[in-house]
Image (tube, rainbow, N blue to C red):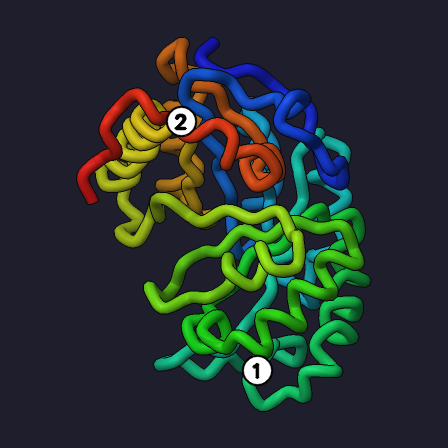
Amino acid sequence: MGFLLLGTLASQGLGAATCPLHNHGNLAVIIDDLGYNLDTAQVAAAIPAPLTMSIIPGTPYALEVADLGAKRGKEVMLHMPMAAVRTRVSDPLVLDGQLPVADIGQRVQQALQSVPGAAGMNNHMGSALTTNREAMDALMSELAAQDMFFIDSRTTAETVARDAAKARGVPSASRTVFLDNKPELAAVEIQIKEAVRRALVEGYAIAIGHPHPATLTALSRALPRLPADVTVVSASQIARCHENHRRTSMPRAAR
């Protein structure tokens, strides 16, 4: 098997000496947009690797998917709707730049009620909100209070989310590769290979996909056959430990 089934570290503040990342390639795979369909969530949860399941709060099956993930030993995240530049995010729990900063923490707490056990958060859309430093500071203050980590989906190059996270002591990391901008099997397979390459060159990579049939099929085929020097880990492991495990002896991949 090309991966190790490692336990998740949902809320442990780990130091460099105890971070369980490997000296070779560490790959986290996040499945976004879960909660709308229970069948696809069951397919994702059945993939034999420690995937991270990111659930949109308030969706019809959010509670069931969170419970499913916990029972299958998957790490669960909150896929928090955030305001976008070009698309109106019509969600009652969306974090919007017009929302009073004092209310951001309250809205996160409300969202967590439908995704119990969430260890961390990543942004659903958010190309507008993640550039708003005041809003990001308020969000990270709440995540720090909840002992949660943050994965920046990087829906914009102008994001300040990681800067805000670091300022508040919130473990964080950024998405490396989107797997399924083109949700076709061959295209997803190419993106998985790119994620593996980046993990080997840089020491870690975070791949984000969605519950498309092509994505789930490609992951089901590829993850059990990864190179021996690539280990699938949870998103929290990279968020909490990656700064101490970035490769320095090899050139960074061309971007």
Q: Is residue 36 visible?
A: no
**Residue under the point 79% across and 67% down:** 109
- Foreground: disc 1 or disc 2: 2
Quarter of the picture holding the C terminus: top left
Residue 185 occupies quadrant:
top left
161 over 77 or under it: above or below: below
* Image position, residue 18 (x, y; %): 68, 22
* Contact between labelled residues 2 and 1, with CB atoms less than 8 Å apart: no
Label 2: how many residues lie within 10 Å, few (<14), some (14-19) or many (20+)? many
Write down the residue under mark 1.
96
4 over 92 or under it: above or below: above
Write down the residue under mark 2.
203
Q: Left or right: where does residue 81 sit relative to residue 153?
A: right
Residue 137 occupies quadrant:
bottom right
Q: Left or right: where does residue 200 sit relative to residue 27?
A: left
Residue 235 occupies quadrant:
top right
* Image position, residue 6 (x, y; %): 63, 21
The kind of residue tagged 2 is Gly
Label 1: how many residues lie within 10 Å, few (<14), some (14-19) or many (20+)? some
Give the mark nearer the N terminus: 1 vs 2: 1
The kind of residue tagged 1 is Asp
Q: Is residue 120 visible?
A: yes
* Image position, residue 59 (x, y; %): 66, 65
**Residue under the point 37% across and 44% down:** 176
**Residue under the point 62% across and 47% down:** 171
